[in-house]
Image: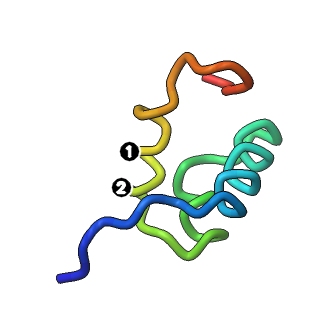
Amino acid sequence: MRGYAQLTQEERYKFHALRKAGHTQKEIAETLGRSPSTISRELRRNKGLKGSSS
């Protein structure tokens, strides 16, 4: 089983652009080649921070 690795800075930029464009967690995960659970953790971790789209 592979351990959890946080998103890279480049992936975070893409992640935020995709969220702002209205993509779902599943679509973002597929685009970034990451697990949907990784995307979910990133959303929870960054909820409420400046620039995030909740």
Q: Is there CB contact under 8 Å for labels 1 and 2?
A: yes
Disc 1 marks a residue whose amino acid type is: Arg
- Give the quarter of the figure containing the C terminus: top right
Disc 2 marks a residue whose amino acid type is: Ser
Res. 18 mark:
none
Q: Residue furthest front?
A: 9
Q: Where in the figure is residue 9, as x and y percent of width and height?
A: 66, 58
Viewer-closest of 2 and 19: 2
Asked if 52 appears above or below 20 in the picture, the reply is: above
The secondary structure type at the circle numbered 2 is: helix
Q: Residue furthest left?
A: 1
Q: Is residue 42 left or right of residue 21?
A: left
* Cα distance between the residues tagged 1 and 2: 6 Å
Q: Where in the figure is residue 4, as x and y percent of width and height?
A: 30, 66
Viewer-closest of 18 and 5: 5
Res. 41 mark:
1
